[in-house]
Image (spheres, helix red, strand yellow):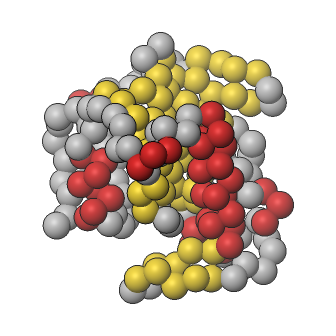
Amino acid sequence: MRAAYGTGLTRHAKSGLDFATDADLDAERAIFEAIAAARPEDVRVGEESGEVRGVGGGSGSRRWLVDPLCGTLNFAAQTPLVAVNVALVDGADAVVSVSADPITGETFWADKQGAFVRRDGADEPLLPSSRSHSSTSTATARWIDPSWARSCSQTQPSGRRSVPG
């Protein structure tokens, strides 16, 4: 992904003004291949390719949710605000979520043991600051595909959320 940053990227129209680049497609393919090699029976759901059933066409309870390049427009415009996002859910249980910054090389992840960051090959726990207040925190998204949201909401714990569609 980092090698593609700042290069001429072919854009592939998706819908409306949305597009994918070769970097999106190549990253999703590489992530899917790595998951399939390690967990061939698991379902993979990608932003670019949709759902891919595991070996034997089984639907299984383990699902990998992959956004190979969150911030495609930024990436194409050489704005370094992008991430590669992967999450594993098992039934309704979130197992692990990973967000990697291909520009800085930092990787953030959270599981049932806590939240961590890997910088320069060293893992550090992430801890809330004394100024952190989840009750006043806000998470936003500029755009979300309703079918993707429905797929994800099947595995999310209950809570307040606004999903179009």
* Label tally: 0
> Residue 163: horizontal and vertical position, in percent?
20, 57
The residue shown at (47%, 22%) is: 111
Is 114 above or below relative to 38? above
Compared to residue 45, the image places residue 14 above or below, namely: below
Residue at x 74%, y 57% (from the top left corner):
1
Left or right: residue 155 versus residue 73 is left
Coordinates of residue 59 in the picture (x, y in percent): 35, 44
- Residue at left 36%, top 37%? 60
As drawn, the residue found furthest toward the top would be 113
Drawn side of residue 126 relative to residue 105, left or right: left
Write down the quadrant of residue 135 in the picture. Answer: top left
Residue 129 seen from this side: no
Q: In which quarter of the image is residue 69?
A: bottom right
**Viewer-nearest residue: 105 or 85:** 85
Q: Where is residue 78 in the image (x, y as percent from the top left)?
A: 71, 70
- In this view, the residue in front, 120 or 111, is 111
49 vs 157, left or right, is: right
Q: Which residue is drawn at 46% across and 55% down?
A: 52
Query: In the rendered image, which quarter is residue 21 located in?
Result: bottom right
